[in-house]
Each structure stands twice: as C-alpha cells, then as structure tokens.
Image (cartoon, rainbow, N blue to C red):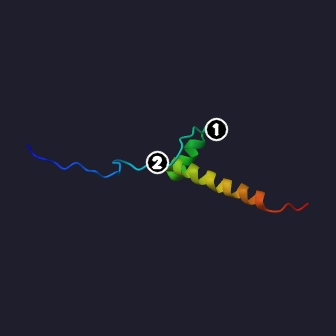
Amino acid sequence: MTNFPISVSSRRMGRPPLKVKPTLVRLPEGMAERIDALVGKNNRADFIRTAVEKELERIEREAEEPSES
C-alpha cells in the first residue's frame, strides 16, 4: 500500500469566506429587468451592492455636514 503524507496544515480547503450576509430585497415590478438591461443579469447583485454603498456614503456625508440653521 502507498503511504500518503497527511497534511498538518491548519488551512481550510475550498472557497474562502465571502464575509457577506444574504439579504432579500424586494424590487418593484420591472426594476430587475431594467438593471439587467443595463449591466447584465450576472452583474445585478454587484450593481445593487454598489448602488447601496454609494447611497449610504451620500447619506452619511450629509449627516456629518453642519446644518445651516
């Protein structure tokens, strides 16, 4: 019988953790198709993540600005 060495490495095999949390987002009828027409169906999730990140940054920036009262 062949003697194969067993790895003692602590590294896990397979895909590394993506560090994302799946979230269900309900879009108005037709919006997914509009997104797909612009960026392609395989890029829909990336488009939504990017759009949400930009909007969060915009709102956070506005919240940091001193109000003109």
Number of other residues with Cα within 10 Å of mark 2, as a class: few under 14, some 14 to 19, many 20 or more: few
Q: Secondary structure at mark 1?
A: loop
Q: Is residue 21 left or right of residue 12?
A: right
Q: Identify the residue at image location x=62%, y=54%.
A: 53
Q: Position of 66 compared to 54: left or right? A: right
Callout 1 crowding tier (Cα within 10 Å): few <14, some 14–19, many ≥20:
few
Q: Given contact means CB atoms under 8 Å apart, are the residues at marks 1 and 2 in contact? A: no
Label 1, label 2: how far apart the Cα atoms are:
19 Å
Residue 14 image label:
none
| Residue drawn 85% across the image and 60% down it | 67
Q: Position of residue 4 (x, y in %)?
A: 16, 48
Instruction: Answer with the quarter of the image where residue 63 lies.
Output: bottom right
**Name of the residue lying farthest toward the left:** 1
As drawn, is 46 to the left or to the right of 9?
right
Check disc 2 and report its element: helix, strand or loop.
helix
Residue occupied by mark 1: 28
Q: Disc number at residue 42?
A: 2
- Point out the residue furthest to the front here: 8
Percent of width and height locating residue 7 = 25, 50
Which residue type does callout 2 highlight? Asn
Residue at 34 percent across and 51 percent down: it is 10
- Which of the marked residues, 1 or 2, is nearer the chain's N terminus? 1
Please, what is the three-letter code of the amino acid marked with disc 1? Pro
Quarter of the image with the C terminus in it: bottom right
Tag count in the figure? 2
User: Residue 39: image x %, image y %?
Assistant: 52, 52
Residue 5, image x and y in percent? Answer: 19, 50
The quadrant of the picture occupied by the N terminus is top left
Task: State which quadrant residue 66 falls in.
Answer: bottom right
